[in-house]
Structure formats: C-alpha cells, structure tokens
Amino acid sequence: MTPRVHITVEDIRQIAWTMVDLHGPQAIGYADEAVTDLDEQGQPEGADAWRALRSVMEDALAGRLARDGDITVH
C-alpha cells in the first residue's frame, strides 16, 4: 500500500516552476504524457494530480502565476 502524501498549494507552485525552468513549454508535453500513462495504468488520482500541475504550469508559462506571493486555487 502506498502512503498518502499531502502537498500544499505552494508545493504545487514550486513543482510547476521547477518543471517550467527545466523544460520550458515542453513541460506541458511531459505532463500530458504522465496523464496518459497514469490513465492507462488505471490510476485516475495520479492522472488528476498531473492535470492540476499542468494547469499551474500553463499559468506560469502564460505569465499569470508569480513565483512567490499569495496564490488562490479554485
């Protein structure tokens, strides 16, 4: 059994910016691959986590997400 790990909104922002810094726009493609692979493996929660991260990476790339400061998740 895999233990559940809870990450914060700030963790997600840091992961997103790390991916963007390392891979630029290609980070979106990596997220898409992860979603596809996890869906095929029958792991919808993991796929959903990557979908959420993809969305945050899109905001970072589009200039809608600052590297620091307050962040609101809807």
Image (cartoon, rainbow, N blue to C red):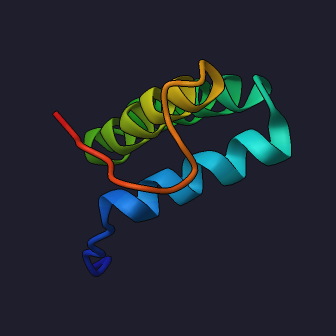
- Give the residue at x 33% y 53%: 70
- Give the residue at x 56% y 36%: 34
Q: Using the image as rendered, state which of residue 49 and residue 2 is in the foreground.
A: 49
Q: Using the image as rendered, state which of residue 24 and residue 6 is in the foreground.
A: 24
Q: Quadrant of residue 14?
A: bottom right
Residue 44 spot, x, y in % from top left: 28, 38
Image side of residue 43 versus residue 53, left or right: left
Residue 71 spot, x, y in % from top left: 32, 48
Image side of residue 60 versus residue 43, left or right: right
- Give the residue at x 49% y 35%: 65
The image quadrant where one finds the C terminus is: top left
Residue 56 spot, x, y in % from top left: 46, 34
Residue 22 spot, x, y in % from top left: 83, 47
- Give the residue at x 40% y 31%: 51
Q: Quadrant of residue 1?
A: bottom left
**Vertically, is 68 above or below 28?**
below
Residue at far front of view: 69
Q: Using the image as rendered, state which of residue 32 and residue 43 is in the foreground.
A: 32
**Vertically, is 14 above or below 22?**
below
**Vertically, is 52 above or below 9?**
above
Could you tell me how many numbered marks the image carries?
A: 0
Residue at far top of view: 62
Residue at far left of view: 74
Q: Using the image as rendered, state which of residue 18 and residue 63 is in the foreground.
A: 63
